[in-house]
Structures are given as structure tokens and as C-alpha cells.
Amino acid sequence: MDTKKMLLAAICIAATPVIPVLLAAPSLARDYPFCRKGEAGPGDCRYETLEQCQAAVSGTAAYCQPNYWLPPASREMPPRRAR
């Protein structure tokens, strides 16, 4: 094998793990209005509704609270729907 072919093969092998990273779609960042809070740490703020959060904390010592990292207008509790 000549030097050019070996160099091309080495470049292809080295670039293989990088290609999926370059082709990956960017994730959409989203701030959720409700957080699960336990004893320590910032909490788990990935709940769109209070009901989702309450289901996640059911049977644990954790509780739900509004996401205080959001601006005040985004943090307001939505009105409860009648069932």
C-alpha cells in the first residue's frame, strides 16, 4: 500500500467516531414550571404540570414546588381544571 492510501485510511478511521456527533440534531432546551424537591440539591425541574410532579413524588419524602429559576410570569400556577 502506498503512503497516500494509508494516510486516507487513517483519516477515515480517525473521523468515524466524530461523524455521529457532527450529524446529531441539537436538543431543544426547555424550562419546566414545576420541580420535584427532596432533601438536598437544586431539585428535578422537568415537569410540565403539577399533576405530573405529584405523581412522581407519590410515596416519597419529596414534594413539588414552582420552578423559581423561571421569570415570574412563567412561574405562575395555572388554574386547576374541574374534573
Image (tube, grey):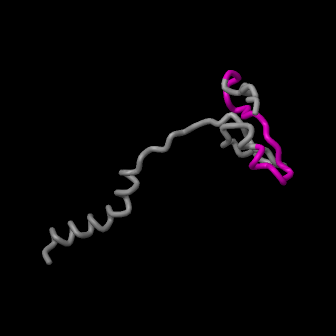
| Residue at position x 69%, y 37% in the image | 49
- The x, y position of residue 44, in whole percent, is 71, 45
Query: In the picture shown, does residue 78 fall above or below 15?
Result: above
- Is 43 placed left or right of 19 in the picture? right
- The x, y position of residue 6, in whole percent, is 20, 72
- The x, y position of residue 51, in whole percent, is 74, 40
Q: Quadrant of the N terminus?
A: bottom left
| Residue at position x 41%, y 46% in the image | 25
| Residue at position x 71%, y 27% in the image | 75
| Residue at position x 81%, y 50% in the image | 58
- Is 39 placed left or right of 35 in the picture? right
> Toward the viewer: 41 or 48?
48
Q: Residue furthest bottom?
A: 1
Where, by quadrant of the figure, is residue 32 drawn?
top right
Q: Residue furthest right?
A: 61
Query: In the picture shown, does residue 54 fall above or below 80?
Result: below
The magenta span reads 54-73
> Toward the viewer: 24 or 8?
24
Q: Is 63 covered by the magenta stretch?
A: yes
Query: In the picture shown, does residue 48 fall above or below 40?
Result: above
Q: Quadrant of the C terminus?
A: top right
Q: Is 57 covered by the magenta stretch?
A: yes
- The x, y position of residue 29, in whole percent, is 54, 39
Q: Residue furthest left?
A: 2
